[in-house]
Structures are given as structure tokens and as C-alpha cells.
Image (cartoon, rainbow, N blue to C red):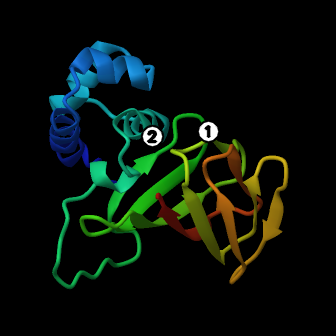
Amino acid sequence: MTQPIRVIAQSLVRERERAGLSLSEVARRAGIAKSTLSQLEGGHGNPSIETLWSLCVALNIPFAQLLEHQETTTRVLRYGEGSRVTAEHSNYQAILLANCPPGARRDIYQVVVQPGADRLSPPHPPGSVEHMIITRGRALLGLTEALEELGPGDYICYPADREHLFRALEPDTVAIMISEQN
């Protein structure tokens, strides 16, 4: 598993400077320590999905913008490849498969989830939508007040600017997630 900390570090500095915000202000908005943000911008640490999402919300950028450089060439990722991040309190991994070109805000991920701790996601920026397709296993997912059970080939779409959850019901549950932001 490769932690994309170097790309994350460069992206954090670029996006913070683009927004014209200080290190202290981004840390405050994200609800993290200034020293943590400083370490991440320096290319050190192992940030959780929760920390990265908080920084994305604070900077008003799509999640994938922290994980990958924009590319315009043909790209093939074999199963298990890609920039990978893990959740802090659940056995949940997100692997970035593709991000959008400039001006577009759609990112594609492969997620691999194990039963046990649920992946409870706080609301993403307003207008966010997630599309999920289960490719292996079974899961209970969607808005926390309206969870749906899905199996291989099943698709769900929900507003990700509301609290939502992913609960694996079988080991090695795999899904393709498409995240959109308006």
C-alpha cells in the first residue's frame, strides 16, 4: 500500500495558496491542529480519510484534487493499484481510479470495505452526490436515515451533502464510487 503523502503535500500547499488562506486559517476551518497541517504540507504523516475530507471542505475542493495530478493521457490501473487512503475508525479503503479535468468535479474510486466498523461520512460540500456500484460482496449503504442493502451489480445514488454510511455485510466487499461536486 502506497501512501500518496508527497502528492497530498504538494496539493495542500497549492490549494491553500490558491485560496489565499494561512496555515492557521485552514487548520481552524478543518478542525485540526496547525502542527498537523504543517506536517502534512511538509510531506510527513499518514492522514486519515476523515482528515483529508475536512481539509477538502475547508479548501472547498474535491477530494481527488489532493490525491492525484491532472492527466490527459490514457491510463490503465490494474486491480489494487492507485492512490490509496484508509479510514481512521473503520476498515475502509478508498482507491482513486480517476479524477476530473479542470472545471469538472467528478471523481471515481474503488472502495474495499470489511465488516466491523461502519464508515460514517459527515456531509460533504453542498451539492455533492455519490453514485455507488457494488462489484463484490454485499453492503448496507446510503443516507443514514434511509439505508439500502445492495449486492453485486446493484447501484445507488444519494446526496452526499447529508450524513451517509457504508457498512460491509461480507468480507472484501468492493464498490465503485463516483463522487460529484457542483
| Residue 170 percent coordinates (x, y) | 74, 63
Circle 2: residue type:
Trp
The residue at 52%/35% (across/down) is 88
- 7 w.r.t. 77: above or below: above
* Element marked by disc 1: loop
Quickly name the residue at label 2: 53
Which of the two discs, 2 and 1, labels the residue nearer the N terminus? Answer: 2
Q: Is residue 130 left or right of residue 110?
A: right
> Disc 2, disc 1: CB below 8 Å?
yes
Checking the image for residue 122, the label placed there is 1
The residue at 59%/46% (across/down) is 91
Count of marks, rendered view: 2
- 162 w.r.t. 114: above or below: above
| Residue 147 percent coordinates (x, y) | 82, 57
Pointer 1: residues within 10 angstroms few (<14), some, or many (20+)? some
The residue at 40%/38% (across/down) is 52
